[in-house]
Amino acid sequence: MTPHHITTLPALRQLFGPARERALKKEIPALDAHAVQFIGLSPFVVLASSDAQGQMDASPRGGDAGFVKVLNAQTLLVPDAPGNNRLDTLENIIATGRLGTLFMVPGFDETLRVNGRAVLSTDPADLALCADARRTPALVIRLTVASVYLHCAKAFMRSGLWDASRHTDRAQMPSMGEMMRDQIRSFKGEEIEVEAQAEMLARYQQSL
């Protein structure tokens, strides 16, 4: 710690001042019509969770627009999809029963945050609601909503995330396979076979 580290709430508030009244009032305890419509348009959500020791994790989930299902004003279903089987988010939910979500819609600079308590469900009715043309999920995350609020557009406006003229050429960085090889070599002292980017994308396509 140094004198320049902020370690108390009074010191933090001295730097920023109080929250704006509208920012406090915009948080609501359930999904309203606007939140339901936003989720229905969203093909992408980030799931934030932590384990029992407070170690944090954020994990992306994607699907067709509306792949996260709204059961009612207090309940969401997030289908699981094939991944790498680390199960970080799912294990964290078992440990703490809590989940934060951030919904995004391509072209929208606003985002939607929905937080609450979560359980892992294999209820056949939940699975059937989340089935699509590709698969019926092995399980779904059932989120009981505690807080909902729209997040302002500033971050996306600053980043120009949806502006194609500001997109970065993928060739600016090595392939994921090459980066993984270098990281595992540097931190684990092990060598792995490098999968070409085209091969990796073809493999991903088989389990989308």
Image (cartoon, grey):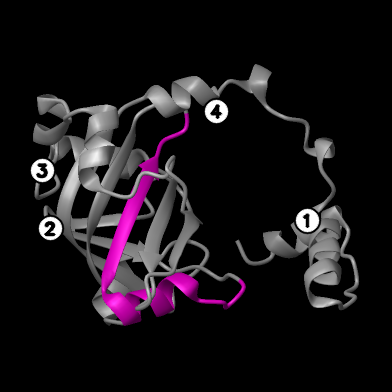
Q: Nearer the viewer, residue 197 or 157?
A: 157
Do the numbered discs 1 and 2 sit on residues whose CB atoms are within 8 Å?
no
Residue 28, which numbered label?
3
Do the numbered discs 4 and 3 sit on residues whose CB atoms are within 8 Å?
no
Q: CA distance from mark 4 to mark 1?
A: 21 Å
Q: Is residue 193 above or below residue 61?
A: below
Do the numbered discs 4 and 2 sit on residues whose CB atoms are within 8 Å?
no
Label whose residue precedes the other's in the sequence (4 or 1): 4
- Please tell me how crowded label 2 is: few (under 14), some (14-19), or many (20+) other residues with Cα within 10 Å: some
Q: Can residue 146 be seen at all in this image of the molecule?
A: yes
Do the numbered discs 3 and 2 sit on residues whose CB atoms are within 8 Å?
no
Quarter of the image with the C terminus is bottom right
Q: Which residue is located at x 48 percent, y 53 percent?
A: 63
Amino acid marked by disc 3: Ile
Q: Does 140 sit left or right of 193 as displayed?
A: left
Do the numbered discs 1 and 3 sit on residues whose CB atoms are within 8 Å?
no
Label whose residue precedes the other's in the sequence (3 or 2): 3
Q: Is residue 95 above or below residue 170?
A: below
Name the residue that disc number 2 marks.
74
Q: CA distance from mark 3 to mark 2?
A: 11 Å
Q: Which residue is located at x 25 percent, y 75 percent?
A: 125
Give the x, y percent position of residue 69: 29, 56
Label whose residue precedes the other's in the sequence (1 or 3): 3
User: Seen from this angle, which residue lies furthest top?
Assistant: 165
Name the residue that disc number 4 marks.
161
Nearer to us of marks 1 and 2 is 1
Nearer to us of marks 4 and 2 is 4
Q: Can residue 121 be seen at all in this image of the molecule?
A: no
Q: Does 138 sit left or right of 196 as displayed?
A: left
Q: Is residue 32 above or below residue 208?
A: above
Q: CA distance from mark 1 to mark 3?
A: 40 Å
